[in-house]
């Protein structure tokens, strides 16, 4: 398969093979390849305005972030995708996993940013899901389903930025933030190429020791060759002019809930990875709300399909939808 085949075209090509008896879900290598191709395509350099000398000019920096989408619910609508075209300083929000699991845990110098690509953002805005009043009505009417795979794939990225000491600056993606320059140390990707999404998590090469310290291993059958970037990955990154990504490692991917699987990022999930309790899909299955807008309690563990109480309506695995929209004033039946 040509290294120039995009992440979008890659999944469409896989869909065409289904006519000849494909699996219900992608295999591990296919999921790994899709993750890298989607990332490479989304990272192509851009000359958009607003970037400073501290910004690596990757195209996904022009996606809307969650703070911009889920704005004041009393406005008529949030910003539209067509108007986003400049770099802006990162807001450095609190780390959402720690907030969800234990809000009392100190978060020294946190800097997290969540991004939605145009397909995901347009779905949220177009369906009125950016405020809790609209979200709870839509969730109770029918199953919320982001675009993909036969349409432009919805993609969401959760990124963590640090200011580590003694860094090899040329090996990191950088960004200007409200706190000054920061370096991309780890990130998740949700790619809606399957019903349960394809989940991928990455970490900078200098921090892979944290994966082994947590008792986990790197599992990248497409992009890794004896701990180094594979020839196919190097060709892919060269074709998209994003060689900077050679310094990041894919920890692994996850597709489907039926088989229990441990997958997590020691920077993003921290204690959960160490405790062997991290599973992307099983956790995000609890992204659901009641008719009043209340989020389902619990976390998924690592095993298969955890049960969710009947009164909760699923939000297609998106915790951004579950926790970020707030109620419109005057909607007395809505609870934040």
Image: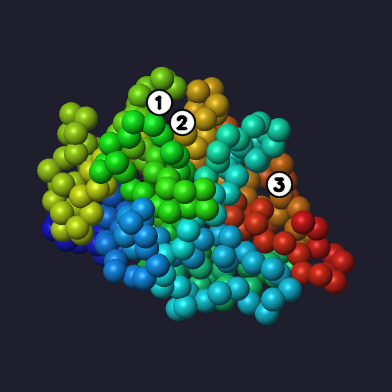
Mark found first going from the N terminus, 3 or 2: 2
Q: Under tag 3, what secondary structure?
A: loop
Q: Which mark is residue 266?
A: 2
Mark 3 or mark 2, whichever is nearer to me? 2
The image quadrant where one finds the N terminus is bottom left
- Residue 14 placed where, x, y %? 27, 58
- Residue 287 placed where, x, y %? 62, 50
Q: Which one is nearer the viewer's eye here, 58 or 14?
A: 58
Q: Which mark is residue 210?
A: 1
Q: Under tag 1, what secondary structure?
A: helix
Q: Which mark is residue 296?
A: 3
Q: Quadrant of residue 321?
A: bottom right
Residue 130 vs 212, above or below: the answer is below
Asked if residue 6 can be seen in this view, the reply is: yes
Cα distance in 3D space between marks 3 and 2: 25 Å
Cα distance in 3D space between marks 2 and 1: 6 Å
Tell me, yes or no, whether the two marked residues, 2 and 1, touch with CB atoms within 8 Å: yes
Q: Residue at x 42, y 65 (%)?
A: 87
Residue 25 vs 81, above or below: the answer is above
How many residues crowd mark 3 within 10 Å: few (<14), some (14–19), many (20+)?
some
């Amino acid at each position: 398969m040509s290294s120039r085949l995009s992440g979008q075209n890659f999944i469409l090509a896989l869909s065409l093979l289904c006519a000849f008896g494909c699996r219900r879900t992608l295999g591990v290598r296919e999921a790994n390849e899709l993750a890298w191709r989607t990332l490479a395509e989304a990272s192509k350099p851009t000359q958009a305005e607003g970037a400073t000398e501290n910004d690596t000019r990757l195209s996904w920096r022009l996606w809307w972030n969650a703070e911009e989408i889920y704005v004041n619910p009393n406005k008529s609508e949030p910003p539209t995708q067509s108007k986003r075209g400049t770099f802006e300083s990162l807001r450095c929000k609190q780390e959402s996993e720690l907030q969800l699991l234990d809000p009392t845990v100190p978060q020294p110098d946190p800097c997290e940013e969540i991004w939605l690509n145009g397909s995901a953002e347009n779905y949220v805005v177009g369906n009125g899901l950016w405020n809790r009043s609209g979200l709870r009505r839509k969730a109770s009417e029918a199953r919320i389903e982001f675009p993909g795979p036969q349409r432009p794939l919805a993609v969401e990225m959760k990124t963590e930025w640090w200011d580590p000491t003694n860094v090899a600056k040329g090996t990191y993606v950088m960004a200007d933030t409200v706190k000054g320059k920061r370096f991309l140390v780890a990130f998740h990707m949700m790619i809606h190429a399957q019903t349960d999404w394809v989940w991928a998590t990455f970490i900078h090469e200098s921090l892979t020791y944290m994966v082994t310290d947590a008792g986990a291993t790197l599992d990248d059958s497409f992009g890794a060759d004896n701990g180094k970037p594979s020839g196919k990955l190097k060709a892919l990154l060269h074709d998209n002019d994003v060689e900077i990504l050679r310094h990041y490692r894919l920890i692994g991917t996850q597709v489907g809930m039926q088989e229990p699987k441990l997958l997590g990022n020691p920077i993003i999930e921290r204690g959960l990875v160490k405790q062997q309790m991290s599973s992307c899909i099983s956790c995000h299955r609890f992204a659901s709300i009641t008719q009043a807008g209340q989020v389902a309690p619990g976390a998924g563990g690592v095993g298969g399909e955890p049960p969710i109480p009947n009164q909760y309506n699923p939000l297609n695995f998106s915790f951004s939808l579950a926790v970020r929209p707030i109620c419109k004033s005057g909607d007395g039946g809505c609870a934040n």
